[in-house]
Amino acid sequence: MSTAELTRKTALLANIKGISSRIAEACLRGGRDAGAVKLLVVTKYAEDSDIRLLAEAGLMKAAGESRVQDARARWTGGGPLADLRGRVELHFIGHLQTNKAKTAAETFDWVDSVDSVKIAAELSRHAAAAGKKIPVLVQLKLNDSPTQSGISPDEAPALLAEVRKLPGVEPRGYMGIAPEGASPTELKTVFLNAKAVFDRDFQGPGNYLSLGMSGDFEAAVEAGSNLPRLGGLVFGQ
């Protein structure tokens, strides 16, 4: 390993260590077990070399991508990261269009942004044809932004009931994005409300509430998120 590579690895490991400490502190405040929290590393803007360093060090178990075609080229076939798939679980975290459902079903281990029966049905159809059953998260709309995808918490049970009927997908929790610019008090309320919805609709291990990004993950974890999504803090972007 060159000096530059060693320096970069040291920086990445320090970033992960710092994040892990902050997650542990948030769990302590929330009376939770830090071992139950899984970090989803958002890799869409990261260098392939950085991703490889973290994966090979055993510090990245799950990666999040939001562009279907880019992820396919990167993580499958002869892509530069294809050999890491045995150790990295790949999640789709962007808005999924129905015409990309087939590629998504073939490429990703999880789809964390289901917000309609239509997209769930397309995913299910293609997953079943490939002999797969894909775990999915239903995306909750936690803000009033007209450009934000998701379904309201009030409508979530009806969607969840329909998704649970589909053979090629398996609902395993909720994902949400906090309102931009929300105060600490507003964040706490939003996250606790999402946790209440999650607890109502999902029980047992293996289910995820994916809340929190680089700017608000500590509040999200304290409130009950067990799958925060971080990119900038990990890679120093």
Image: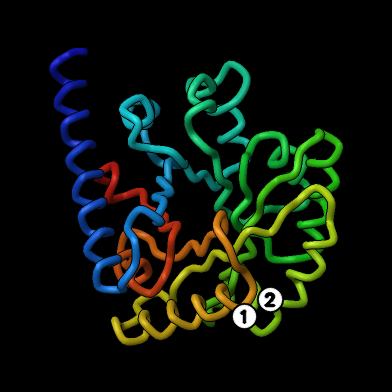
In this orientation, which residue lies closer to the viewer: 165 or 104?
165
Kind of residue at disc 2: Ala
- The x, y position of residue 77, in whole percent, is 62, 19
Name the disc covering residue 156, or none: 2
- The x, y position of residue 168, in whole percent, is 80, 47
Would you name the residue on which mark 1 appears? Answer: 153
Other residues around mark 2 within 10 Å, as few (<14) / some (14–19) / many (≥20): many
Q: Residue at x 14, y 26 (%)?
A: 7
Kind of residue at disc 1: Pro
In which quadrant is the N terminus drawn? top left
Q: Residue at x 26, y 51 (%)?
A: 20
Q: Residue at x 43, y 38 (%)?
A: 61
Q: How many discs mark residues in the rendered view? A: 2
Q: Please, what secondary structure does the residue beneath circle 2 have?
A: helix
Q: Are marks 1 and 2 in contact (CB under 8 Å)?
A: yes
Quarter of the image for residue 133 reads: top right
Report the Cα–Cα distance between label 1 and label 2.
5 Å
- The x, y position of residue 42, in whole percent, is 42, 46
Q: Is residue 94 left or right of residue 151?
A: left
